[in-house]
Amino acid sequence: MEEKTTTPSHFIRTIIREDKKNGKNDGRVHTRFPPEPNGYLHIGHAKSICLNFGMAEEFDGKCNLRFDDTNPEKEEVEYVESIKEDVRWLGFDWEDREYYASDYFEQLYEFAIELIKKGKAYVDHLTPDQIRKYRGTLTEPGKNSPYRDRTVEENLELFEKMRNGDFGEGECVLRAKIDMASPNINMRDPALYRIKKAHHHRTGDKWVIYPMYDFAHALSDAIEHITHSLCTLEFEDHRPLYDWCVENVSAPSRPVQIEFARLNLSYTVLSKRKLLQLVREKYVDGWDDPRMPTISGFRRRGYTPESVRDFSERIGVAKKDSIVDLSLLEFCLREDLNKRAERRMAVLRPLKVVIENYPEGQTEELDAVNNPEDDSMGMRKVPFSREIYIERTDFMEDPPKKFFRLYPGNEVRLRYAYFITCTDVVKDENGEIIELRCTYDPASRGGNSPDGRKVRGTIHWVSVPHAVDAEVRLYDNLFKKPDPDDVDEGRTFLDNINPNSLEVVNTKAEPAIGEVQAGDNFQFERMGYFVADKKEHTSGKPVFNRSVTLRDTWAKISKK
Ligand code: ATP
Ligand code: MG
């Protein structure tokens, strides 16, 4: 059986387990993931998806996918499609429960009428500016609007006129009648409906009034019989309003909101507004640019759904905000790919080596292991010849003390091949090294020491006449600072963009690379994990993205 790392449990699991045990909601567990289709999903949303779908799975419940599309101007069909693709890719299934808040517009309107009839909502004709002034501050109570005591009949008539488009945008709103002196500003007669004469991606021009988030969200949960409505901490102060909405209409069920801390990642911005800006202003090449923290960006970068789910599990669910180190996510990817990705050899920055005592015109095939972690992945043949490429960084003419790779007079092992010794360095007129001369020991075939003599370094290589050219994209963090929003006055997160986040290198790879499919993951030995780019890789022109390096900083950090 596969070993499963045990991760700490969390308070939401405890609450749900208790509720189920006590027979609350008849023992039902029903969650939902409620994205607003105004951008692509990011890794923070992945945490929410894994939590909502994960809890439903664990407690034999259901999880709905609900598009929170109450804001007509910012929403687009493209986003709906991308969100569905991302949730599916993560491995979750909403079955036939794909819902839209906009499907409930009629029902929500009826709930609003109900509130008016109960004297709990009124049409307010204060201007937006006046409403702000009347609202008061954290230290001062608000003031009642002069329109607050309109009669039920008058309110019903005015609200219907709102719906019919008889008023202009901003002319009036429907407000809940709660308490203008409440210490919680959210309870000072919050707006429930506003006028927006905008086209909606699903309802078209049918509506000119749109429900506000708190009202629509709470009642959509109730309509769908959601039991546990999991959301991020910034909604904690909205919970009394959530409860008020559900309690003051004849809601078909009584959901409960539970807040958890949102994911923050170092070197990363997780705000759709900022991500949209990066895309629109072309700091990156689209939402799925491999440097983007979007789910589609991670997918194109070569992340696996398993690694993202593992990450979501490991970070846990807390009640207090914190910043998770990006290297934990990288650690999860390495853990996953180490077991699954086949190894190949590719030289990212090639330096030619001529093996002078190797017979000219001769080639041979050597055996290479596909994955030392998994024998069932077998072996492959790698061609060898008199001329090979090695990594430029594996040679130093004048090395420091602990450099164990190639330098004049030193012997190293070529992985799966032979021991070679550097005998000469060839330079061009500018003094640039263009070629190395070496000799090899035929008795070391397969990389085995013929007489027990030791070499300290093992390097990878690719045979020159057999090499396949590949474009390789190496990525660094998109931001220079752990907190991209850490800026001096007058500056923005854009000033923290790392100008060197992408480096493209022309790589020489072993011929087996010619056969890979777009989306396949590999480890290029010693250089990291790579994926054949989903969009641009073809067998004629291989293109690889480096998903992550092999260096494991997180393991070191966590040991401190
Ligand atoms: P952003 O602030 O990035 O624009 P949002 O909260 O407006 O995100 P929604 O589409 O409303 O985006 O989010 C859908 C769900 O995902 C919500 O339940 C929200 O709480 C959750 N979510 C959003 N960002 C994070 C995050 N960083 N960590 C955990 N959950 C998140
Ligand atoms: Mg939101």
Image (tube, rainbow, N blue to C red):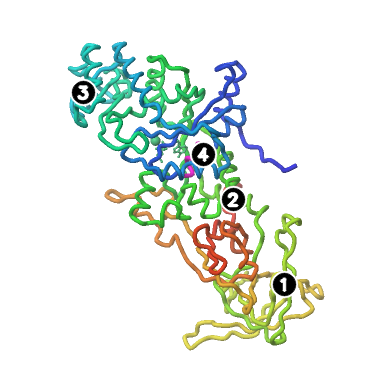
Residue 353 rendering spot, x and y as whole percentages: 62, 80
N-terminal of the two: label 1 or label 2?
2
Please identify, in this view, whether the residue under mark 1 or under mark 2 is nearer the observer: 2
Q: How many marks?
A: 4
Please identify the quarter of the rendering in which residue 548 is found: bottom right
Label 4 beta carbon within 8 A of ligand 1: yes
Label 2 beta carbon within 8 A of ligand 1: no
N-terminal of the two: label 2 or label 3?
3
N-terminal of the two: label 3 or label 1?
3
| CA–CA distance in space, label 4 to label 1 | 47 Å
Which portion, as a residue range, is magenta?
42-49
Please identify, in this view, whether the residue under mark 3 or under mark 4 is nearer the observer: 4
Residue annotated with mark 3: 134
Mark 2 lies on a secondary structure that is helix
| CA–CA distance in space, label 4 to label 2 | 16 Å
- Residue at point 59%, 19% (across, down): 27
How many C-alpha atoms fall within 10 Å of the one at disc 1: few (<14), some, or many (≥20)? some
- Residue at point 63%, 50% (across, down): 336
Ligand 2 quadrant assignment: top left
What's the mark number on residue 333?
2
Mark 4 lies on a secondary structure that is helix
How many C-alpha atoms fall within 10 Å of the one at disc 4: few (<14), some, or many (≥20)? many
Residue 70 rendering spot, x and y as whole percentages: 35, 32
Q: Is residue 467 magenta?
A: no
